[in-house]
């Protein structure tokens, strides 16, 4: 029988979350930018990690890998086949599917060039009632990652891929940026009622020091300006009433860089 999966947020570094998915015994670690809080969580919950999943090569996502592999020599690391890493790993890319036997879960790999050129996400839809997305620095709560390596067009297409996943998908991003992102989004869409509600809800979570994540895709589609480039209100806010969705995306990504 399938044991229920749990996903724990481990706050790390300045504003990262390292996600720990487990079944009470075995665990997989997503984007460990620091090993210390992960080792602590593994000990506290008495978990054995079998695998590490890496979405992209930035230091705040990989710097804990060496120490975790030293502590657990049998651990398997899965990372993008399009990028290079300073440790042993199994390279994966779309349309690969990773089977995590101990957790009885399949993860589809999605290529998401933009933030980095080789950025990938992991999407689980097994069991069918549990849809989970680990999207690294591509999609954030009410925002998206910066364009460090890819073009605006690549990022726009990557976000469209995520937007096409089932609306009930839980979205596990790797930074606590949601409140700042909502404040920016409200400047573009001040009369979006879902966005206004999300602002108040998120303020409450953060006042209690609770993570604003995971989000779910349905909420992102209704409140995330980078998934709402069709919005007439956004087009009017940036004075581009006749622009294409890609032009709107490019413009608001540019404005956000200086926000
Ligand atoms: Zn990054």
Image (cartoon, helix red, strand yellow):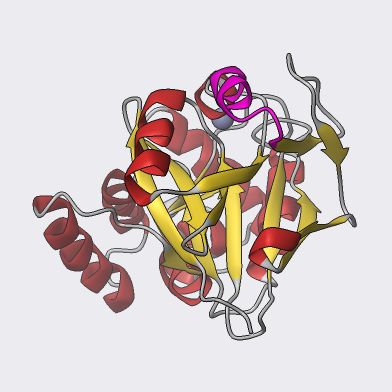
Q: Which quarter of the figure is the N terminus placed in? A: bottom right
Q: Is residue 67 magenta?
A: yes
Q: Residue furthest left?
A: 207
Image coords of residue 93 (percent x, y): 86, 45
Image coords of residue 170 (percent x, y): 51, 69
Q: Which quarter of the figure is the C terminus placed in? A: top left
Q: Is residue 61 magenta?
A: no
Residue drawn at (41%, 48%), measured in percent from left and top?
46
Is residue 89 in sight in this rendering?
yes
Q: Residue furthest top?
A: 86
Ligand 1 lies in which image quarter? top right
Is residue 229 in sight in this rendering?
no
Compare residues 19 and 219 and report the one nearer the observer.
Answer: 19
Image coords of residue 59 (percent x, y): 55, 19
Question: Along the horizontal axis of the image, is 35 left or right of 98?
Answer: left
Q: Which residues are magenta?
A: 65-75
Compare residues 22 and 78 and report the one nearer the observer.
Answer: 22
Residue drawn at (43%, 73%), measured in percent from left and top?
219
Q: Main secondary structure of the magenta part?
A: helix
Residue 57, quarter of picture: top right
Up-down: is 60 above or below 129? above
Up-down: is 29 above or below 95? above
Image coords of residue 18 (percent x, y): 45, 40
Compare residues 106 and 73 and report the one nearer the observer.
Answer: 73
Residue drawn at (45%, 74%), measured in percent from left and top?
222
Question: Along the horizontal axis of the image, is 44 left or right of 146?
Answer: left
């Amino acid at each position: 029988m399938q044991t229920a999966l749990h996903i724990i947020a481990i706050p790390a570094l300045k504003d990262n979350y390292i996600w720990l998915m487990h079944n009470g015994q075995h665990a997989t670690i997503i984007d460990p930018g620091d090993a210390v809080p992960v080792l602590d969580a593994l000990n506290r919950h008495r978990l054995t990690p079998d695998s590490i999943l890496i979405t992209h090569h930035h230091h705040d996502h990989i710097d804990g890998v060496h120490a975790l592999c030293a502590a657990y020599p049998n651990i398997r690391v899965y990372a993008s086949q399009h990028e290079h890493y300073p440790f042993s790993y199994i390279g994966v890319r779309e349309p690969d599917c990773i089977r995590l036997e101990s957790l009885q879960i399949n993860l589809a790999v999605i290529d998401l060039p933009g933030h980095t050129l080789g950025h990938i996400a992991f999407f689980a839809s097994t069991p069918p009632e549990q849809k989970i997305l680990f999207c690294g620095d591509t999609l954030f709560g009410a925002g998206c990652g910066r364009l460090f390596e890819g073009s605006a067009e690549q990022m726009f297409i990557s976000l469209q891929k995520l937007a096409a996943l089932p609306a009930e998908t839980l979205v596990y991003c790797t930074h606590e940026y949601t409140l700042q992102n909502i404040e920016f989004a409200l400047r573009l869409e001040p009369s979006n009622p879902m966005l206004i509600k999300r602002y108040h809800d998120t303020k409450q979570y953060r006042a209690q020091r609770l993570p604003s994540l995971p989000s779910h895709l349905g909420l992102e589609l209704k409140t995330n300006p980078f998934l709402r480039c069709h919005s007439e209100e956004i087009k009017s806010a940036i004075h581009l009433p006749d622009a294409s969705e890609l032009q709107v995306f490019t413009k608001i990504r540019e404005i956000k860089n200086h926000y």
